[in-house]
C-alpha cells in the first residue's frame, strides 16, 4: 500500500473526481430522460382510500444520540446534523395489483411510488428511484408475493439490521405460509442464503432480483417499511436478530478480536503492520470475515469483550457480543457515520471512535468518502487498549 494514498494530492484528486462525477452523472441522466419525477403516495394514503391494508407493527420511539468520549467536535457536529431523533413507526402494507421495480424494491400502486416504505431523508425514495421506470415489460406473479428488497440489501450491515427484521414484521401481519414468491437480493454472499434458510424462506419460492430494470406486477403484495433509517437501530431489531441466531451464540471463542481487511479495495489500513503489532502484543486474535459463514461469525463474536477494526460492515457482528463489551472503531477522517455508535448503544456495548491521522479535506471539498484509506492513530489506540486490555505475556495473537 502506498502512503501517498492519503496525501494532499491524492485527496484533492478524489474530491474533485467525486464532485465532477456526481454532476456529470446527474446531467447525463437529465439529458437522457432517465431521471423521472414519479407521482407519490404513502401507505397511509392507500389505506385511507381503501386500496390497501396497513398494519403498524412497531410504533415510533425516541432514538437519542449521546456523544462518545474523545470524539472530536467537528465529527460530533456532523453526526448531529444528520440525526433525526426517533425511530419511525414500522408498517406492513398488504396491497393488490402493485408493481415492484429494481433490486431496490420500489413499490408502485396505481402508478404512484409508495414513498414512505423507504424512510431515509438524506437519500429519499423519490431521489433514489428517479432513474427507474414503473412502466414497461414486467413479469407477473400470481398469488401472494413478499418483498425483502431494499437499497443496499446485499451489504452485510444493511441486510442484518434492515433486511432480517422485516420477515418478523411480515409474519405479524399475515400467514407467511400463504406466500408464493419471495423477492430477495441475489445470493452473492453466502450469508444471504444462510439467513434466508434460517428465516424459513423456501428456496423454491425465492426470486433473486438485482439491477434497475426488473419489474414485477403482483396479484397481492406483502411488503414492510425498512427499519433503522438514519442508523437509528430500534432495540427490537437487535432482539430479533439475536433471537434468530441464538443457537450459534454459544461462546467459547477469543475474548479479544481484531477485524482485519487486508484484501479490500477501500478503507485500507495504510499502517496495518503497526496496528497488528499493537493488538497482537495484547493477545488479540486477528480475524478475516470475507468468506466466513453466518454461524461462524456469530459464534466468533459471542465471547468477545473487545473488538477492534476499521469502519466496515464486518463490525456489525459486534451486536453478537455480550453486553458490556467494547467496540473500537478506526475511522478515516473523511468518513464519519454514527452507524456503529448507534448500534452499540442499543446492543449494550461501549463504543470508542479513533479518527485517522491522514489529512482532512477543507469544507468546500469535503464529502463522506466511502472509499477513503486510513492511517490509524497508533499512539491513541495503544493508550485506549492500555485501559481496556493491559499488556500481558502473549497468549493469543493467532489468525482465524
Image (cartoon, rainbow, N blue to C red):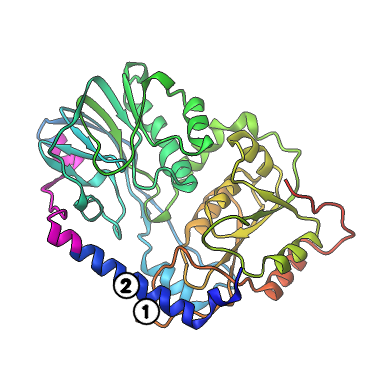
Q: Is residue 36 left or right of residue 260?
A: left
Residue 162 is situated, as x and y percent measured from the top left of the image, at 41, 43
Which disc number belongs to residue 48?
none
Q: Is residue 37 above or below residue 278?
A: above
Q: Is residue 400 left or right of residue 243?
A: right
Q: Is residue 152 above or below residue 184?
A: below
Identified at 51% across, 52% down, the residue is 343
Asked if the residues shown at circle 2 and circle 1 are in contact, with their CB atoms under 8 angstroms apart, the answer is: yes
Which residue bears the numbered disc 2?
19
Tell how many labels.
2
Residue 77 is situated, as x and y percent measured from the top left of the image, at 43, 74
Residue sitting nearer the eye, 59 or 10: 10
Residue sitting nearer the eye, 23 or 221: 23
Identified at 13% across, 49% down, the residue is 38
Residues shaded magenta:
28-47
Identified at 40% across, 19% down, the residue is 204
Q: Residues within 10 Å of mark 2 (few under 14, many from 20)?
A: few
Residue extending farthest right:
393
Residue 239 is situated, as x and y percent measured from the top left of the image, at 52, 38
Residue 312 is situated, as x and y percent measured from the top left of the image, at 53, 56
Q: Is residue 253 left or right of residue 333?
A: right
Tag 2's secondary structure?
helix
Can residue 249 be seen in this snapshot?
Answer: yes
Q: Quadrant of the N terminus?
A: bottom right
Circle 2 or circle 1, nearest the eye: 2
Which residue bears the numbered disc 1?
365
Amino acid at each position: 500500500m502506498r502512503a501517498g494514498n492519503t496525501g494532499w494530492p491524492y485527496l484533492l484528486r478524489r474530491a474533485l473526481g467525486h464532485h465532477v462525477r456526481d454532476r456529470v452523472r446527474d446531467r447525463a441522466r437529465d439529458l437522457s430522460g432517465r431521471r423521472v419525477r414519479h407521482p407519490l403516495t404513502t401507505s397511509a394514503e392507500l389505506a385511507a382510500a381503501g386500496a390497501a391494508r396497513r398494519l403498524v407493527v412497531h410504533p415510533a420511539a425516541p432514538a437519542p444520540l449521546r456523544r462518545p468520549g474523545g470524539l472530536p467536535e467537528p465529527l460530533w457536529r456532523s453526526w448531529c446534523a444528520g440525526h433525526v431523533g426517533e425511530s419511525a413507526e414500522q408498517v406492513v402494507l398488504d396491497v393488490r395489483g402493485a408493481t415492484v421495480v429494481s433490486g431496490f424494491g420500489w413499490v408502485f400502486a396505481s402508478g404512484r411510488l409508495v414513498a414512505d416504505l423507504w424512510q431515509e431523508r438524506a437519500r429519499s425514495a423519490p431521489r433514489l428511484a428517479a432513474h427507474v421506470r414503473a412502466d414497461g415489460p414486467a413479469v407477473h406473479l400470481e398469488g401472494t408475493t413478499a418483498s425483502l428488497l431494499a437499497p443496499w440489501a446485499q451489504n452485510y450491515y444493511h441486510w442484518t439490521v434492515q433486511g432480517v427484521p422485516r420477515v418478523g414484521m411480515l409474519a405479524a401481519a399475515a400467514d407467511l405460509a400463504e406466500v408464493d414468491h419471495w423477492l430477495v437480493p441475489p445470493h452473492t454472499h453466502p450469508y444471504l442464503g444462510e439467513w434466508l434458510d434460517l428465516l424459513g424462506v423456501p428456496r423454491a419460492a425465492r426470486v433473486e432480483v438485482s439491477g434497475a430494470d426488473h419489474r414485477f406486477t403482483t396479484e397481492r403484495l406483502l411488503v414492510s417499511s425498512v427499519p433503522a433509517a438514519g442508523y437509528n437501530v430500534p432495540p427490537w431489531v437487535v432482539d430479533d436478530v439475536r433471537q434468530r441466531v441464538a443457537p450459534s451464540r454459544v461462546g467459547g471463542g477469543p475474548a479479544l478480536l481484531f477485524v482485519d481487511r487486508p484484501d479490500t479495495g477501500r478503507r485500507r489500513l495504510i499502517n496495518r503492520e503497526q496496528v497488528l503489532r499493537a493488538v497482537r502484543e495484547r493477545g488479540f486474535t486477528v480475524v478475516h470475515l470475507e468468506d466466513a459463514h453466518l454461524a461462524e461469525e456469530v459464534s466468533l463474536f459471542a465471547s468477545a469483550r473487545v473488538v477492534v477494526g476499521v469502519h466496515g460492515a464486518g463490525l456489525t457482528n459486534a451486536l453478537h457480543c455480550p453486553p458490556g463489551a467494547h467496540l473500537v472503531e478506526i475511522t478515516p477522517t473523511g468518513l464519519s457515520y454514527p452507524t456503529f455508535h448507534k448500534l452499540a448503544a442499543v446492543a449494550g456495548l461501549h463504543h470508542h471512535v479513533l479518527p485517522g491521522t491522514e489529512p482532512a479535506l477543507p469544507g468546500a471539498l469535503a464529502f463522506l468518502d466511502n472509499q477513503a484509506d486510513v492511517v490509524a492513530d497508533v499512539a491513541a489506540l495503544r493508550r485506549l487498549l492500555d485501559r481496556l486490555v493491559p499488556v500481558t505475556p502473549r497468549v493469543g495473537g493467532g489468525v482465524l
